[in-house]
Amino acid sequence: MPGTLMPLEVRGVCFAVGDKRIVQDVSFVIPDAARTVVLGPNGAGKSVLLKLCHGLLQPTAGQISWGGQAPDQDRRRRGMVFQRPVLLRRSVAANLRHALRVHGVPRRRRVALAHEALQAAGLEHKAEQSARTLSGGEQQRLAMARAWVLRPEVLLLDEPSANLDPRATRIIEQLIRGFEAAGTHVIMTTHDIGQAKRLATDVLFIHRGRLLEHSPADRFFSSPTSPAAAQFIDGDLLE
């Protein structure tokens, strides 16, 4: 039996494109993630950090490990959903069955797992509808269900409710809580302070590619230790 994916350890990680430093000397440990929120303004480096953690990008310097293994090892035990997910030109249910087929799940098992994921996402009534005709919020829920259908231990979500209205955002947040209740740890990025307050158990606050704070959510929002975090929580523009 493989060991747990946790802890996630990030040690001195940097990422640069040419002369532009996007992530700078970031270090943290998440021993047992529940709902970890990577918070910060647009352009802070949140999405890049998530891709580095998933092994989609290689750090310029530093090391990342999941339970002692490199990010490119055993990636099936993690899932990731991008801010703008790409759906296949087929039905809602077929998108889920395809993900299961690619990972070698037997045909009869695919149907049951896909149905469970559709129910979790509240999309069972749209199972045969073309995925690309769904609303923006429904497409995001389908992408999340597709990542979760394999029951990953950790799900990485990049701005899962960006550009969605309040109702769609509320449904997305309910889905995230449902994933956690089913045993999947969630690590997500957002620039939405209200969403972070509703969901986070711990917060990583990033500004200009640097990790300025990592603390339990209640402590972060009540007593931030960095001036930039305090400004951000108060709604001030960061320079």
Image (cartoon, rainbow, N blue to C red):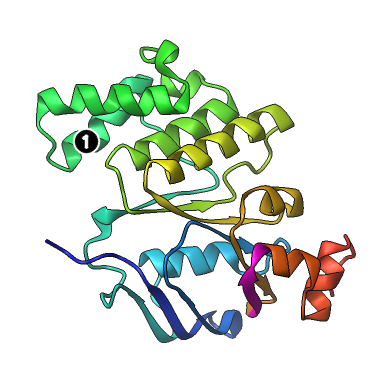
Q: Position of residue 229 (x, y in %)?
A: 78, 72
Quadrant of the snapshot with the N terminus = bottom left
Q: Is residue 127 visible?
A: yes
Instruction: Out of 54 and 212, give the one closest to the viewer.
Output: 212
Q: Is residue 215 magenta?
A: yes
Q: Position of residue 62 (x, y in %)?
A: 42, 87
Residue beneath the point at 21% across and 36% down: 100
- Please, is residue 132 above or below residue 197 in the view? above
Residue beneath the point at 31% across and 70% down: 71
Magenta highlight range: 211-217
Q: Secondary structure at mark 1?
A: helix
**Residue 105 lies in quadrant:** top left
Residue beneath the point at 69% across and 27% down: 167
Q: Amino acid at mark 1?
A: Leu
Q: Main secondary structure of the magenta part?
A: strand
**Residue 3 lies in quadrant:** bottom left
Total of numbered circles in the picture?
Answer: 1
- Please, is residue 231 above or below residue 225 in the view? above
* Residue under label 1: 100
Q: Is residue 153 magenta?
A: no
